[in-house]
Amino acid sequence: MEMDRDRFEELVGEALDEVPEELLRLMDNVVILVEDDSPPGEPELLGLYEGHALTERGWDYAGVLPDRITIYRHPILRICDSEDDVVDEVAVTVVHEIAHHFGIDDARLHALGWG
């Protein structure tokens, strides 16, 4: 599947628009980015959360750079056959990585169908 970066970023924005406002308001000190390629050695990685989950932040959490949620364009496009597939996969990946920000691990996400 081929899709230019602008359209892909639009889809990430649309996926964010579908996240309930109550959850978006709870997100704290996090930025969402789009990169073309996943890190070396991880070609199948669709998204990545890097930071300190809200459930791990204590009284000493201060003065840190924002957490990062990165959505990887090329790996998602490689597993999709149509734009509808991309829309669905971007939505799942965005929700999955936001869930990590809230401290939900992969096992629980898979159990909930967001793996």
Image: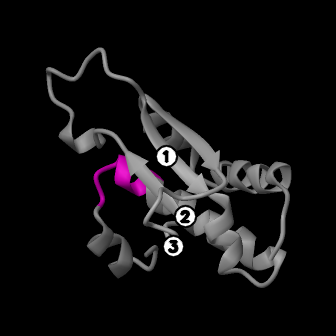
Q: Residue furthest top?
A: 63
- Residue 58's x, y, as percent? 15, 29
Q: Earlier in the sequence, mark 1 or mark 2?
A: 1
Q: Specify the label residue 44 is tagged with.
A: 3
Type of amino acid at the residue the image marks with label 3: Glu
In the picture of the structure, the residue carrying the numbered disc 2 is: 93
The 10 Å Cα crowd at callout 3, few under 14, some 14 to 19, many 20 or more, is some
The 10 Å Cα crowd at callout 2, few under 14, some 14 to 19, many 20 or more, is many
Task: Describe residue 12's horizontal placement relative to residue 48 as left or right.
Answer: right
- Residue 18's x, y, as percent? 66, 55
Task: Describe residue 14's horizontal placement relative to residue 115 as left or right.
Answer: right
- The magenta segment is 98-104
- Coloured how? one colour
Q: Residue furthest bottom?
A: 81
Q: Quadrant of residue 1?
A: bottom right
**Is residue 21 among the parts visible in the rendering?**
yes
- Residue 75's x, y, as percent? 61, 69
Cα separation, mark 1 vs mark 2, equals 10 Å
Task: Describe residue 77's horizontal placement relative to residue 45 as left or right.
Answer: right
In the picture of the structure, the residue carrying the numbered disc 1 is: 69
Type of amino acid at the residue the image marks with label 2: Thr
At x 73%, y 69%, the residue is: 87
